[in-house]
Amino acid sequence: MKKLMQMASHKNFQNDNFKHTKKSSRVGDNPDFNSTVKLDELKGNSFDRNLEKWIQFIQWSKWFPDLFYDLISPEKGGMRLDLDQRVFLRSMSRFISTYGVFPRGFGKTMIELMSIYHTCIHFPDITIAMSAQTRENASSISEEKHNEIIKWFPLMNNEIVKSSFSKDQVEVIFTSGAIYSVLANSQHSKGQRRRRLNVEESALLNNSLFKDALEPVVNVPRRTIGRLSTINPYELNGMINYLTTSGYRGSDEFIRLINMIDDMAELKGKMVLGASWELPCHYGRGETRTQILAKRDDPTTSSVSFSQNYESKWVGATDGALVGINKLLELRTVPTASIHPRKSREYFVGADIARSQSNNNNKSAFVVVEVERASNGKIKTATVCNIFVPPNGTNFNDQAMFLKRLDKHYHCNVTTVDANGIGQGVVEELMKETIDPLQNDPYESWDTINTDETPQNIDSPQKIFSLKAQGIQTDIVTNFIDFVESGRLKLLVPSKLLDTSDKNKNNKDMNQIKAAHFQTDQLIDQIANLKLVQKQGGKLSVEQVAKKTEKDIWAALAYVLYYLKHYEDYKREEDSFSVLDYLYISN
């Protein structure tokens, strides 16, 4: 800090931000916390003679973190903060809670860590943490941004005693005694104590988990290091900041954001900031306008994904949503996709066939569901273990061939096919004997379970459930809701949380796993975009909030769940039926 004072004496701060004050200077964050030091009582050394200037400098430095970084920035090669970054940095230093919703490429994590380091320098012995979905994720981004801060602001080396980074641990110790570390947004953080907390990707946060494990982390305030060792009532103890790209309307975090906006309007010490991709693009950060617009116009880009990652829009239905988004997100507990079949599991496939092969936004989708049964034969869980979306324009024969490959790989029991309109063409191809041109394997013809159609071979196995949704749409919708609400449906964790460090997986397997988790993200987007519609006579249907976002993956899943509920859920109980169970014999 002495070096900072020397630098400050050589720079011009003749502005409203850094003025000489009266002898009873204001100290720290408190405009009314007056110094009781009298000049005539000070000793003769230089520190005592300049104590009032030190107080003024610390006041200024705490209140203007961006100017503090300007002060320690080198003449050449340093980082120059843009106006929006300065506002964000000041908010995180001045308010008890800041909620930042920013797009990819904004640089929010860098500003977040700069705010943390600024706090660690100015508040002795404080402990502060960044939490992310996993400690590994928090550790990775911390190390990357730490190195950038040291690069752009070399004087930071004088404030850091030790910095250590591992796969899931971070510890940065400052000369002030402050410590920065990382936590996970999970029950593993329960019982931990820090003075302040920053939550990364808070849109993925579960509120019950937050209340139970994360919010109590900051319950114990910092004590000053002087002789009194007291709690400064004007310090922002218990600060929790939230940083994220946008999520889903109606989620816990969406509600928290709305409540914080109300608190901000009522001057309760909260601040909410947000921006679309156009703001960082204006300042030349991240991708160019041409690159981003090309992504928006790319037919393979999900409109929901673009809205969340670039436009900072909270998407989905708030009123009349098909299912509660919080409940849906709670189902994402399966850590890794099953790209190979597992023992004691049954596999079923649902197929939604595109209505038009020329429409870029209308695709076929195949969903593989892994079924685990209870001891009585009822379905215990139905896990979406893999999802495939074939390219547009794939003909009936190729789609049927792909379904037979899936059947062979997973040893599937039944494939449910949407046989309305164009889907009937795929059913007819499945009922033919074929040879796989890629593997040169012969595939037998399949028979249907529920129709009178005749396959090419009369002895073909019954593996097709030919579903025609007319008249049963209400059952399909209510059955899907039941699987979600009962918790029997299980989904893969977000692709952001996928552990890609498993050395037992080769590159091909890992790419397939990544694809399955990515397609599950698309499934969540599609479900969040659906509204429940009640038609005449009490019948139910769904409609899309944003028409550009398709519902093909959801439909394939809903179809196979309909089959499981009506034809498999009680299968073993029926198979084990014995007339003796109902026979009464009297003596």
Image: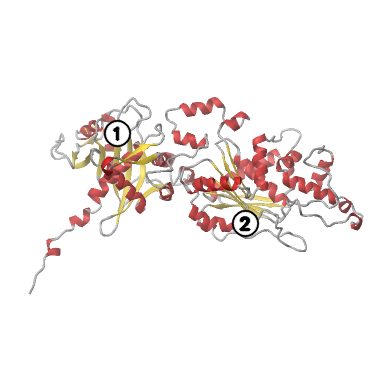
Left or right of 535 in this view: 239: right
Residue for badge 1: 353
Residue 241 versus residue 580 in the image, above or below: above
Asked whether the viewer can see residue 269, the reply is yes
Identity of the amino acid at label 2?
Arg
- x%, y% of residue 225? 74, 59
- x%, y% of residue 581? 15, 64
Residue for badge 2: 194
Residue at x 48% of width, y 29% of height:
296
* Quadrant in the rendering for residue 511: top left
Which of the marked residues, 2 or 1, is nearer the chain's N terminus?
A: 2
Left or right of 344 in this view: 306: right
Q: Residue 303 or 572: which is nearer the viewer? A: 303
- x%, y% of residue 112? 63, 44
Q: How many neighbours does mark 1 have within 10 angstroms: few (below 14), some (14-19), or many (20 or more)?
A: many
Residue at x 88% of width, y 56% of height:
38
* Quadrant in the rendering for residue 280: top right
Identity of the amino acid at label 1?
Ile
Q: Residue 82 or 406: which is nearer the viewer? A: 82
Query: The C terminus appears in which quarter of the rendering?
Result: bottom left
Label 1, secondary structure: give it.
Answer: loop
* Quadrant in the rendering for residue 190: bottom right
Left or right of 286 in this view: 508: left
Asked whether the viewer can see residue 348, the reply is no
Q: How many neighbours does mark 2 have within 10 angstroms: few (below 14), some (14-19), or many (20 or more)?
A: many
Furthest toward the left, the residue is 587
- x%, y% of residue 538? 28, 44
Label 2, secondary structure: give it.
Answer: loop
Q: Residue 261 or 294: which is nearer the viewer? A: 261
